[in-house]
């Protein structure tokens, strides 16, 4: 568990990355924690270090994506602290890698932002050096001259750097010394050196203790006992033409493929000069699983699976043993470099997908973040991403460390197309090239960008006067290309007046279905024509509306009888006796409040037979003498 001082010593590296045109900003943090840190160990104030508001990391759904199957880390969404979730053993997690990095992707939504965070697992000295065997038996001829060297099995320590093996010590001996060679601070060979000639008759057995020390604090050690038996036998060991060989083999090479042919000689004759080959006892088991060695010819061939993505280099130690009564051994090393072939297609993962996409999203909006990884190396592992259909309004842009962003490259219109199927293909540059595709289903969400539309902006209706109050006289109807609440319509009558009287006194409308009702019984003799303005508005944000002008004509019916003007019940007219036929006696006039045909009149005498002395004009109402 890190204390407070160690918290302050945690290394944090900020790398400012290129601001892209899309709304996901990428940056990087680098934390270092020691291995074996327990659950809850503080790693870093990730929200603060990334410049995120702690109050919104929960609402923005901050989450961590790791390529590893195990989730070693977790973020406390209350305080933005990254802590250890699973205990990490560096030797298990990174057995063949000097630097152990766990890459994390920190993603927040609304808007989408992605950050790259590396957590370096620092080695601690939690492993003691261990020899392959606690006891080593060596047989040495007394004829071996001073300066002869004998390879020893080195100890193994899975720790790194100074925590690994830095020194060997041999117990005091008059005959033997210890020599080891370092390369880049790593002990690569361990040999027992004969300081002076042995004399079996004086001492036939030498017991030595070999101790391996690491450089950790506290220093840890391991021991192995060496028992040397002195015999007077074969005095020439096989010798390779060179102590070190290099060769290469392509991964996925067929079983039986020849990797290398060894060559050694022995100055002895007969059986003492006959040589057989075998893997050194210092070889790890993984070598013997992959390679076979013909003990007679020295041919190294493929026996198992060669996979560049698992192991890139094999260091094989070979012993050449003569067939003397007391066999002598020569040693060499063979470095086998594995050459990568393009045998792994890219791996594609959608780490963030923001759907549905609003139809009014601006160009450059990030729709998805895609992580692409290829386990091959070089050109075989270099991957590009593209969209199969170039007509789609989307672009693929490279982001950071194998990530790509799918961004909007053109306008969207849900009323034309409400969904897209985007096929994203990741292709490496190997030969032949390998690819993988993923289909993204992207829905387009509606925004209120279409106002309700009447079939026509002006309409005309005719109503017969004396209609019953409350009668249905018209139905307003609109269509809206939007969907959902953006297409929910409410109807209303815009305030106006008819001859000083509010329109609401005459008309009403059902806000849900647009049915218009007459609140009063109309009288053509009072109102012949007026206009009603109807408004249709949706409930989108912001709401959109349109208007309809309704011309309303009140049709006349014959509901008024003609009346004489001025009104009289009896009219007395005096005519001189000298009046002649055809002379105008008088003229009567009547009016009718109706209009049109209902107001046309003709005049007639009531209850007067044709014998009377007067005649009346049906059209003008003039009364004249008939005789």
Image: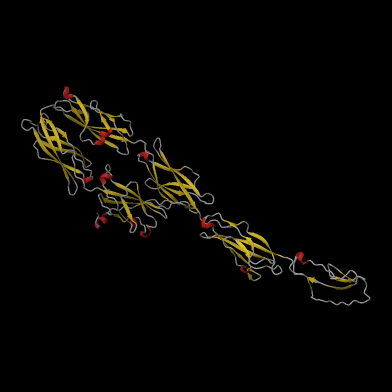
- Whether residue 621 is visible, yes or no, is yes
Rendered location of residue 17, percent (x, y): 37, 51
Q: Is residue 617 above or below residue 380?
A: below
Q: Quadrant of residue 226?
A: top left
On the rendered structure, is 531 left or right of 240?
A: right
Question: Can you tell which quarter of the image residue 551 is in?
Answer: bottom right
Residue at the limit of the structure toward the right, as seen here: 578
Extreme left residue here?
202
Vertically, is 626 above or below 65? Answer: below
Residue 540: x and y in percent read 52, 59
Q: Give the number of callouts.
A: 0
Query: In the figure, is residue 410 to the left or right of 514?
Result: left
Please tell me which residue lies in front, 10 or 278: 278
- Could you tell me which quadrant the N terminus lies in? bottom left
Q: Quadrant of the C terminus?
A: bottom right
Q: How is the image coloured?
A: secondary structure
Residue 335 in view of the camera: no
Between 248 and 45, which is closer to the camera in this rendering? 45
The spot of residue 435 in percent (x, y) is 41, 39
Q: Is residue 568 left or right of residue 406?
A: right
Is the residue 206 above or below the residue 85 in the image? above
Q: Position of residue 293 (x, y in %)?
A: 25, 29
């Amino acid at each position: 568990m890190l204390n407070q001082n160690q918290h302050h010593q945690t290394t944090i590296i900020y790398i400012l990355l290129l601001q892209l045109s899309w709304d996901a900003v990428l940056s990087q943090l680098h934390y270092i924690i020691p291995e074996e840190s327990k659950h809850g160990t503080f790693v870093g104030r990730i929200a603060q270090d990334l410049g995120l508001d702690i109050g919104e990391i929960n609402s923005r759904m901050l989450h961590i994506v790791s390529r590893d199957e195990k989730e070693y880390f977790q973020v406390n969404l209350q305080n933005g602290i990254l802590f250890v979730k699973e205990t990490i053993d560096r030797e298990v997690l990174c057995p063949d890698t000097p630097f152990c990095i766990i890459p994390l992707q920190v993603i927040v939504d609304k808007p989408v932002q992605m950050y790259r965070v590396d957590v370096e697992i620092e080695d601690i000295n939690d492993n003691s050096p261990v020899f392959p065997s606690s006891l080593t038996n060596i047989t040495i001829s007394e004829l071996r001259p001073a300066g002869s060297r004998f390879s020893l099995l080195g100890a193994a320590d899975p720790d790194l750097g100074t925590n690994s093996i830095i020194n060997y010590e041999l117990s005091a001996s008059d005959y033997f010394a210890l020599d080891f060679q370092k390369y880049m601070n790593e002990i690569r060979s361990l040999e027992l050196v004969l300081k002076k000639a042995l004399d079996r008759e004086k001492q036939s057995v030498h017991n030595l203790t070999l101790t391996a020390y690491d450089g950790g604090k506290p220093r840890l050690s391991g021991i192995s006992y060496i028992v040397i038996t002195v015999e007077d036998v074969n005095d020439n060991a096989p010798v390779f033409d060179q102590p070190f060989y290099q060769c290469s083999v392509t991964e996925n090479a067929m079983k039986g493929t020849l990797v290398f042919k060894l060559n050694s000689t022995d100055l002895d004759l007969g059986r003492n000069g006959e040589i057989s080959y075998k893997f050194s006892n210092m070889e790890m088991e993984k070598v013997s699983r992959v390679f076979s060695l013909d003990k007679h010819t020295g041919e190294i061939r493929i026996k198992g699976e060669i996979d560049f993505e698992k192991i890139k280099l094999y260091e094989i130690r070979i012993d050449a043993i003569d067939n003397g009564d007391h066999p002598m051994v020569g040693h060499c090393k063979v470095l086998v470099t594995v050459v990568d072939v393009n045998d792994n297609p890219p791996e594609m993962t959608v780490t963030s997908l923001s759907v549905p996409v609003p139809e009014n999203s601006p160009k450059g909006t990030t729709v998805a973040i895609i992580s692409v990884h290829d386990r091959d190396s070089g050109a075989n592992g270099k991957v590009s991403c593209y969209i199969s259909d170039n007509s789609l309004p989307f672009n693929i842009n490279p982001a950071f460390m194998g990530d790509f962003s799918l961004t909007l490259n053109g306008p969207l219109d849900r009323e034309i197309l409400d969904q897209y199927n985007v096929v994203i293909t990741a292709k490496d540059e190997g030969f032949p090239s390998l690819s993988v595709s993923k289909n993204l289903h992207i829905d387009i969400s509606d925004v209120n960008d279409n106002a309700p539309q009447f079939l026509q902006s002006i309409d005309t209706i005719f109503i017969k006067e004396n209609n019953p109050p409350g009668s249905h006289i018209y139905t307003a109807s609109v269509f809206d290309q939007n969907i959902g609440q953006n297409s929910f319509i409410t109807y209303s009558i815009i305030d106006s007046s008819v001859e000083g009287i509010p329109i609401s006194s005459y008309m009403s409308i059902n806000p849900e279905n647009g049915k218009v009702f007459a609140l009063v019984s109309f009288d053509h003799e009072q109102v012949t024509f007026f206009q009603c303005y109807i408004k249709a508005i949706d409930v989108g944000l912001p709401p959109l509306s349109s208007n309809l002008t309704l011309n309303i004509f009140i049709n006349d019916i014959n509901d008024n009888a003609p009346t004489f003007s001025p009104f009289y019940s009896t009219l007395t007219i005096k005519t001189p006796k000298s009046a002649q036929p055809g002379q105008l006696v008088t003229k009567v006039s009547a009016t009718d409040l109706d209009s049109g045909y209902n107001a046309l009149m003709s005049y007639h005498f009531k209850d007067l037979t044709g014998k009377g002395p007067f005649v009346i004009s049906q059209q003008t109402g003039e009364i004249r003498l008939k005789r």
